[in-house]
Structures are given as C-alpha cells and as structure tokens.
Image: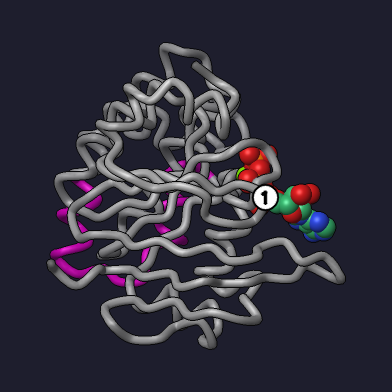
C-alpha cells in the first residue's frame, strides 16, 4: 500500500467550549478524490479548517507527506502545498478577476504561468470576465475563480468545501467537470453534499457524523448502498 499523501488521525477540535470534532480519521491517496460526506453540522468544514490550522485540533495527528503538521501555523501548512477553497469562496469582491488571481500568486515562474494558462482554459469565463470585479461575478463564476486561485500555486493537495453550494444544476455540472479535469493534475479532498456530484468524481468516501468518522469505503460501493445513504446522508 502506498503511503498516504495526507493522513488525519483521530483529530479532536474544540471551538470555544464546544467539542466539535470528537475523532475524525481519514487517509488521502495521491491522485485520488477523497470525498467527505455528512449531514449539515456534522463537522466537515471544521475538519478542513483543522487540517489548515484555522481551528487547530487539540488531540490527534495530521500527517502530510509523512510529516506531522497539526501544530504548524496556517501559513506554514499552506506553504507546504496545500490549497484551501473555503465554503464561502473568500474572493475579493472589489478586485477584478485578474487582480484576484495576481494577488493569490506566490511566484511568477514558468510553472505558475503554465498553471495560469491551464486554469484559464479550464474556466474560459474567467478569461472572458478578466476585468470584472469579483463581487459582480455569478455564484458559479466566483466558485471557479476560487478554485483557480487555489490551483495556481503549485499545490499538491486541494481541500475544496462544497463547491456546488447554492449553484444551479447546470452550473454544478460545469464545476464538476472542471474538478474532474483538475483531478488529472492534483490530489483533492472534496466536501460535498450533492451526492450525484460526489459519486461522479469521488474515488473514496468518508462519512462524518456528529464530529466522528462513521463509515468509509470506495465510492463505487456507496452508490449501491441505499441503507447507508439513508442512515447517514438522509438520501436514498
Ligand atoms: N464558531 C462556532 N461556534 C460554535 N459552534 C460552531 C462554530 N463553528 C461551527 N460550529 C458547530 O460545529 C458543528 C460542525 O460545523 P461544521 O461547519 O464543521 O459542519 P458542516 O458539516 O460543514 O456543516 P454544513 O454541511 O452545514 O456546512 C456544528 O454543529 C456547528 O454549529
Ligand atoms: Mg460546511
């Protein structure tokens, strides 16, 4: 078995007095899309934030490329090559598409230029609205800008939080295709409640329930498991 690119081992996270994560564990294999599923409030966003050191875990370990990172500050974690696309996208509303991308760029070498070209081909809308302010983009375009920004910086791993949220089905499809395309270049942890999207691009899944990893397996098997879907995801 290949060593996991990311390994989350029994992390426990408090927010204020609340014990939010009570034992989340999962592994991410290089080149795969690992999907975190679970109901609203299960702890999916907190899991990604804990990996990034935004809400650091109090117990447990996070390994990235076999090195412990759970005690590092966020800028160091991000500097290791982990890109984060938050739930609320976090783009600058006053800056144009071009400026949003330039502000995010940590280098301007050949590699980054190539990545910029690749990502603009993937999201032609960004090229089209190059001079438009981020705040004036549609929900789907904002999502694309946010993903593009995280991709630019030679990241080996992208953590993407619910990219389909609030988007029309046709736009969801577009975002899904782009993540599928992105998968050829990078490893992805995807939080996604849209099961159609999750099952179309995920290789493995982990279900987070009430702050704990409750179930895991190959995405292929979950598709057939109506009982499990009903129990943890409220769908069937
Ligand atoms: N700042 C906070 N203060 C108190 N509780 C919080 C805070 N942030 C999150 N929580 C709680 O932690 C739990 C997990 O939240 P989290 O955002 O991780 O869930 P989620 O699985 O991402 O949900 P959703 O699918 O709705 O995005 C929830 O019960 C939430 O209310
Ligand atoms: Mg969330």
Q: Is residue 47 visible?
A: yes
Please name the residue shown 33% across and 24% down the image: 223
Color encoding of the figure: one colour
Q: Report whether 214 appears left or right of 226.
A: right
Q: Which residues are magenta?
A: 96-117
**Secondary structure mainly formed by the magenta segment:** helix
Q: Which residue is mark 1?
A: 210
Badge 1 local density, few (<14 within 10 Å), some, or many (20+)? some
Q: Quadrant of the N terminus?
A: bottom left
Residue 53 placement: quadrant: bottom right
Q: Quadrant of residue 65?
A: bottom left
Q: Residue at x 33, y 68 (%)?
A: 6
Q: Quadrant of residue 153?
A: bottom left
Q: Position of residue 172 (x, y in %)?
A: 43, 21
Relative placement, left or right, of 232 versus 120 is right
User: 216 or 12: nearer the eye?
Assistant: 216
Which residue is at the front of the view, 89 or 19?
19
In percent of width and height, residue 109 lies at 19, 69
Residue drawn at (44%, 83%) of the image = 69
| 219 in relation to 116, above or below | above
Would residue 202 be found to the left or right of residue 98 on screen?
A: left
Question: Considering depth in this image, is 3 or 80 the residue closer to the camera?
Answer: 3
The image position of residue 62, as x and y in percent, is: 44, 76
Furthest-right residue in view? 17
Mark 1 residue element: loop
Residue 147 visible from this viewpoint: no
Q: Position of residue 136 (x, y in %)?
A: 60, 29
């Amino acid at each position: 078995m290949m060593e996991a690119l990311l390994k989350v081992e029994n992390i426990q996270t408090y927010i204020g007095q609340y014990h939010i994560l009570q034992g989340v564990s999962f592994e991410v294999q290089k080149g795969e899309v690992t999907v975190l599923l679970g109901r609203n409030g299960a702890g999916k966003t907190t899991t990604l934030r804990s990996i990034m050191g935004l809400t650091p875990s109090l117990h447990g370990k996070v390994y990235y490329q076999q090195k412990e990172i759970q005690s590092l500050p966020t800028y160091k974690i991000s500097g290791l090559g982990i890109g984060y696309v938050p739930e609320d996208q976090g783009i600058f509303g006053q800056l144009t598409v071009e400026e949003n991308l330039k502000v995010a760029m940590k280098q301007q070498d050949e590699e980054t230029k190539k990545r910029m070209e690749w990502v603009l081909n993937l999201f032609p809308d960004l090229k089209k609205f190059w001079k438009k302010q981020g705040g004036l983009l549609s929900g789907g375009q904002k999502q694309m800008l946010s993903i593009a920004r995280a991709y630019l910086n030679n990241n080996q791993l992208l953590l993407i939080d619910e990219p389909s949220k609030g988007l029309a089905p046709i736009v969801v499809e577009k975002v899904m295709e782009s993540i599928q395309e992105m998968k050829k270049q990078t490893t992805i942890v995807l939080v996604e409640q849209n099961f159609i999207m999750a099952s179309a691009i995920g290789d493995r899944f982990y279900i987070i329930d009430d702050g704990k990893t409750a179930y895991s397996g190959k995405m292929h098997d979950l598709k057939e498991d109506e009982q499990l879907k009903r129990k943890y995801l409220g769908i069937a």
